[in-house]
């Protein structure tokens, strides 16, 4: 049976995602020539949510 993941490793992984996600989302959005408004409409999220994601 595989060993359970170390909580420290899971925390580090989540932290790396939180650090990279805002920049990557903005890069992909701009590559598709989408405004934040257009992306949030496609995703069905509020302006505040999209702003918080891109702001990190």
Image: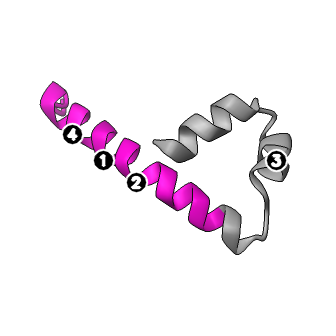
Span colored in magenta: 1-28
Say above or below: 11 vs 16.
above
Residue shown at the point (55%, 40%) measured from the top left: 53
Q: Is residue 2 magenta?
A: yes
| Dominant secondary structure of the residues highlighted in magenta in the image | helix
CB-based contact (under 8 Å), mark 2 and mark 4: no
- Indicate which label's residue lies in the foreground, 2 or 3: 3
- Comparing 19 with 17, the one in front is 19
To which residue does mark 4 refer?
12
Circle 4 SS class: helix
Relative side of 3 to 51, left or right: left
Residue 51 in which image quadrant = top right
Q: Earlier in the sequence, mark 2 or mark 3?
A: 2
Question: Pointer 4: residues within 10 angstroms few (<14), some, or many (20+)?
Answer: few
Q: Earlier in the sequence, mark 3 or mark 4?
A: 4
Say above or below: 29 vs 17.
below
Q: Earlier in the sequence, mark 2 or mark 4?
A: 4
Q: Residue furthest bottom?
A: 31
Relative side of 30 to 53, left or right: right
Q: CA distance from mark 3 to mark 4?
A: 31 Å
| Placement of the C terminus among the 4 image quadrants | top left
To which residue does mark 1 refer?
16
Residue shown at the point (24%, 33%) measured from the top left: 10
Q: CA distance from mark 1 to mark 3?
A: 26 Å
Q: Residue 16: horizontal and vertical position, in percent?
A: 30, 47
To which residue does mark 2 refer?
20
Q: Residue 35: horizontal and vertical position, in percent?
A: 78, 58
CB-based contact (under 8 Å), mark 2 and mark 3: no
Q: Earlier in the sequence, mark 1 or mark 3?
A: 1
Q: Is residue 17 magenta?
A: yes
CB-based contact (under 8 Å), mark 1 and mark 2: yes
Q: Which mark is residue 37?
A: 3
């Amino acid at each position: 049976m595989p060993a359970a993941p170390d909580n420290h490793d899971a925390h580090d992984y989540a932290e790396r995602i939180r650090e990279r996600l805002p920049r990557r989302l903005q890069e992909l959005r701009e590559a598709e020539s989408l405004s934040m408004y257009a992306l949030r409409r496609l995703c069905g999220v509020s302006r505040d949510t999209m702003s918080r994601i891109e702001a990190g």
